[in-house]
Image (cartoon, rainbow, N blue to C red):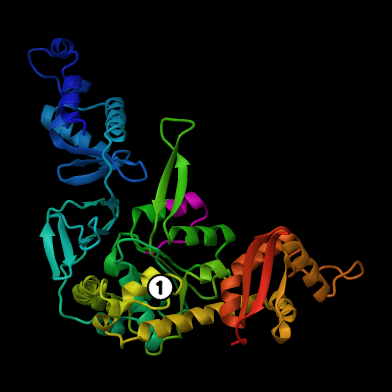
Amino acid sequence: MRHYSSDMNAIGSLDKDKTASAQSGTERSSQPAGLPAIYRLISSRINEFYIDPDGQAYVTMDGKTLPVESRDLADMLLMLVLQETRKPASSGEIGTCIESIGAMCRTSGVVHPVFNRVGASEDGETVYLDLATLSGDTVEVTSRGWTVVRGTNIRFIHPKGQLPLPMPQGGYVAKQVIAPLVNMDGDDLVLYVGTLFGTLMPAGPYPVLMILGPQGSGKSTATLFLKSSVDPTTTPLRTCPDKAENVAIATYGQHVIAFNNVSHLTSWLADLLCNFNSGGSFAARTLYTNWGESRLTIARPIVLNGIDDLTTRGDLLDRAIILRLQPLRGRTAEDELRGMFTQLHPLILGGLLDAMVSVLQHKHDPRFQLQAKPRMADFAQWVVWAEEVLGFDKGAFMRAYAENRSSASRVAVDEQSELVGLLGTLVSKGSNWMGTITELHVALKKQAGCDKMKPIPSWFPNTVRALSNALTRLAPDLERARGISITRSRSNQGRLVELRRVQEPS
């Protein structure tokens, strides 16, 4: 590793004579401090120069992990120079200094993972939860238990608006503590608590939680409590963004992303949610260049709420858990509920941490491994390792999860009932169908009775490409809800599609 402290001292020694001659018998605080003085100060305060796996530059300064291209670092440098030299630094000097720091990071050859709220050791046997307190408290979780520590080698960022978590209290069952706070019971409560616990996974994929219900059903409160349980911020609930870059900014700055009162998910937003919940990437123009590109890899738990079904897109529903709330009777005042949450928050956190210990105890035990892997298998396995400590009966989570996914599949299939009906006629009476996608398009048009005299109906995919895209999104739900599998392969004829009846419709 290069030693940038000596490099910066060398830079700081440049033009000493010019710096000295600029000073009169008394210091003039109105004059800028000068780059040499700034570099000397920085060399004594920055402990590490490095990048994360995406190539974003970071430094460790006074024990804090700071993105180089951030307001936080600029502010710290400005205050450091002012306190130590009693002279201001110009914006140009700070900008030049930050450019130099970034170059040092990018050429250091040092790469470290950087976490937000939840992190893990390299071997995955220790998980850390950043409490984000001024004293730097972090919860360290192993298979032996959990404890609050100060000073770890895990690098956490602290974005603007992040709030501290309370000191956790162990010995409580998460499901029992949470139940009085939300308008849920039965399978819905199991899935809600399971999804909340899933936010403590150090890495995705994470499910997308959709909480639906009429006005007065407590959906916003449930969204707020899930978000605030592990990632409290000054703006916990966000409105739905209007462009992709704003989604990326929201997801990068917080660990749990919560969108409130969503009325509709556009196609581009549904695509982004599918991407970001599982470790997708977002590219943006790199500062200082016209051709460079900054790439952020993002995997975040996402929760959103609304009144109506937010999407019928099979690819998003395949990643989703959907909870449907009923109107509340005898509603508890929201201020009272928030007060209850504040009192119970340490107990909720302690119950979740106890469950994390169970995960680390069981993750290598063959008796606790899922035999059949569902979609979002890592998340499901994480919850199953801890389900009894969370307060679930053995097997309750997977039963609730399977039924929830089947229900979502029925919604997706029912939305395209006409197309599904045509596909069903091709595999009726146990027969299979195989051909190219073009041949399938022709066969379906024939089944629909389309000819020169009868126009193609609006619901029918009017191009071969549109049909191919529709089948890709529909395939998982079609098999679960209607027992029809879609398999694609290659042959001398080209790309083939095979439709098979694998089970009777549910």
Asked if the stretch drawn in magenta spans residue 241, the answer is yes
Left/right of residue 243 with respect to residue 159 in the rendered view: right
Residue at point 60% right, 67% down? Answer: 473
Q: Extreme left residue here?
A: 25
Q: What span is colored magenta in the figure? A: 237-248
* Tag 1 secondary structure: helix
- In the rendered view of the protein, which quadrant contains the C terminus? bottom right
Where residue 115 sits, quadrant-wise, is bottom left
Q: Kindly tell me whether residue 31 is visible in this rendering.
A: no
| Residue annotated with mark 1 | 220
- The x and y percentages for residue 96 are 30, 26
Left/right of residue 115 with respect to residue 272 in the rendered view: left
Asked if the stretch drawn in magenta spans residue 238, the answer is yes
Where residue 312 sits, quadrant-wise, is bottom right
Where residue 223 sits, quadrant-wise, is bottom left
- The x and y percentages for residue 468 are 67, 63
Residue at point 33% right, 70% down? Answer: 198
71 over 203 or under it: above or below: above
Amino acid type for the residue under numbered disc 1: Ser
Q: Extreme right residue here?
A: 453
Left/right of residue 11 with respect to residue 420 in the rendered view: left
Q: Kindly tell me whether residue 224 is visible in this rendering.
A: yes
Residue at point 14% right, 19% down? Answer: 28
